[in-house]
Image (spheres, helix red, strand yellow):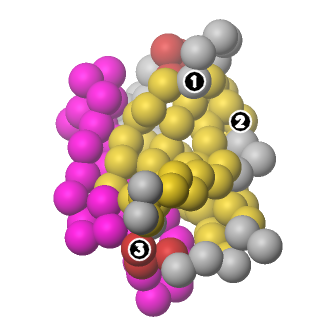
Amino acid sequence: QVQLVESGGGLVQPGGSLRLSCGASGMMFSSYTMGWYRQASGKRELVAGISSDGRTSYSDSVKGRFTISRDNAKNMVDLQMNSLKPGDTAVYYCNAVRIEYGTLYEYWGQGTQVTVSS
């Protein structure tokens, strides 16, 4: 079955950096749009996305500080987070989505905690 496994979360001081990784298995990874979401309280919000052909998008709150990348050979998607702020504290989730013949295929990882605090 499909599995998405995140790693790399932790505690970091404001201004610091973290790199999150998400490994995928059981799926044709290269055909999926991959994304990183976060949830601090309430609604889960999209932080960054990368399409199957490598196009990227970012929320305004992280633009210029976060970078999403993917390695289709390794079935991995990373999120490099720089200049972290306390407001970035959240559980970060890896997401995979694909639409084929009108059917939505969507999968989530279990989440990894990122805490930005001095």
Is residue 101 rendered to the left or right of residue 86?
left
Earlier residue among tags 2 and 3: 3
Name the residue that disc number 2 marks.
Answer: 113
Start and end of the magenta stretch? Answer: 51-80
Question: Residue at coordinates 36% horizontally, 48% vertically from top-left?
Answer: 49
Confirm whether residue 93 shows in the render.
yes
Residue kind at label 3, given as amino acid type: Ser
Q: Give the quadrant of the C terminus.
A: top right
Is residue 52 magenta-colored?
yes
Image marks 2 and 3: residues in contact by CB distance under 8 Å: no
**Mark drawn on residue 31:** 3
The quadrant where residue 112 appears: top right
The span from disc 1 to disc 3 (Cα, nearest Å) is: 24 Å
**Mark drawn on residue 44:** 1
Image location of residue 73, percent across then percent down? 45, 88
For the residue labelled by badge 3, is the local secondary structure a helix, a strand or a loop?
helix
Confirm whether residue 78 shows in the render.
no
Question: Residue at coordinates 57% horizontally, 24% vertically from top-left?
Answer: 44
Please name whichever residue, 15 or 42, is drawn nearer the observer in this view of the structure: 42
113 lies above or below 107: above
The span from disc 2 to disc 1 (Cα, nearest Å) is: 14 Å
Q: Give the quadrant of the N terminus.
A: bottom right
Image location of residue 62, percent across then percent down? 32, 30
For the residue labelled by badge 1, is the local secondary structure a helix, a strand or a loop?
loop
